Amino acid sequence: LDVLRNSRKSIGLVPTLGALHHGHGSLFERARAGCDVVVVSIFVNPLQFGPNEDYLRYPRSLDQDAALCAEKGVDFIFAPETTEMYPETSFTFVDVTRLDQHLCGAHRPGHFRGVATVVLKLLNIVQPDRAYFGEKDYQQFSIIRRMVHDLDLRSEIVAVPTVRESDGLAASSRNAYLSAEQRKAASVLFQALEAARRLVEAGERQPSKAVAAVRRILDNEPEIRVQYVEVVDPVEVQPVAVIDGPVRIAGAVHIGNTRLIDNVAAAPKS
Ligand code: PAF
């Protein structure tokens, strides 16, 4: 990459956990359109999984992943072994405080420390001009953007809109865990968030009312157990007292053993 960098080629990085799907495909397309050289990292980062989470069963499919990368014109795949990324015990971690307090941060202790730490390592290894993140993981995107700002990193962080299936379900590697029945129920998460978005656009200013609307719809679906529904500001990801500007309405649910997240942007019409 240094050779390319020295000949003034711009470098784009798409960090992934692998198990690539068309959501990743749209990140690759954005990187391809915006940069001379596209690098995809594929690494199931143990640091960001909790002790009872799906690190061991997380789908790994390097051959298929490489095929999708080739199809999308990706130039390089960086797929390190765990021992290459973490050759010995690390004593250094990145905590982006405050932004990790709510949504997933409240339910997955240590998760965003693991994400921020590995992303900083990947940014240092690849030194991209731009790095691309999906808006489905909105809190992750916000935390990375803030880390880059606070630590004066030189990569630009680009957010890419969530890719959805035809019924609205956000594309995710974890959708592969769902049975046919669960898969049907899963689309209710987006439908519920959309109902709240419409309420906000119709003039609802109370976050509690928007949250209640989402929960009512989710509670009607017997397959779904709600973990959280929150209305937060789009920069520091804090709950808002009143909806008087752009917000993110975000939710996490369990369907069987599978945890799914999603979020939508909403803003009062002025
Ligand atoms: O969103 C993901 O796939 C991961 O959290 C990331 C950004 C690749 C870090 O491991």
Image (tube, grey):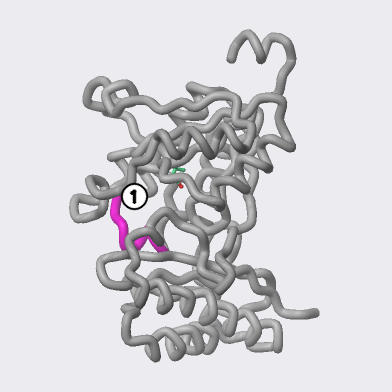
**Which residue is at 77% across, 80% downward?**
269
Ligand 1 shows up in the quarter that is top left
Which residue is nearer to you in this view: 57 or 248?
57
Which residue is nearer to you in this view: 145 or 133?
133
Is 21 situated left or right of 6 in this image?
left
Task: Give the magenta-colored segment's residue range.
Answer: 103-111
Q: Secondary structure at mark 1?
A: helix
Rendering coords of residue 199 (x, y %): 63, 87
Rendering coords of residue 134 (x, y %): 56, 51
**Which residue is at 69% across, 72% downward?**
245
Q: Furthest residue to the left?
A: 51
| Quadrant where the C terminus is found in the figure | bottom right
Report the amino acid beneath label 1.
Answer: His
Residue 178, magenta (yes or no): no
- Rendered image quadrant of residue 152: top right
Rendering coords of residue 65 (x, y %): 46, 38
Vertical placement of 268 versus 104: above or below?
A: below
Residue 108, magenta (yes or no): yes
Vertical placement of 225 versus 162: above or below?
A: below
- Rendered image quadrant of residue 106: bottom left
**Which residue is at 60% across, 62% downward?**
234
| Quadrant where the N terminus is found in the figure | top right
**Which residue is at 35% across, 77% downward?**
181
Q: List the residue tagged with mark 1.
A: 111
For label 1, count other residues whose C-alpha is less than 10 Å away and answer few (under 14), some (14-19) or many (20+): many
Q: Is residue 73 visible?
A: yes
Rendering coords of residue 169 (x, y %): 51, 69
Vertical placement of 16 versus 89: above or below?
A: below
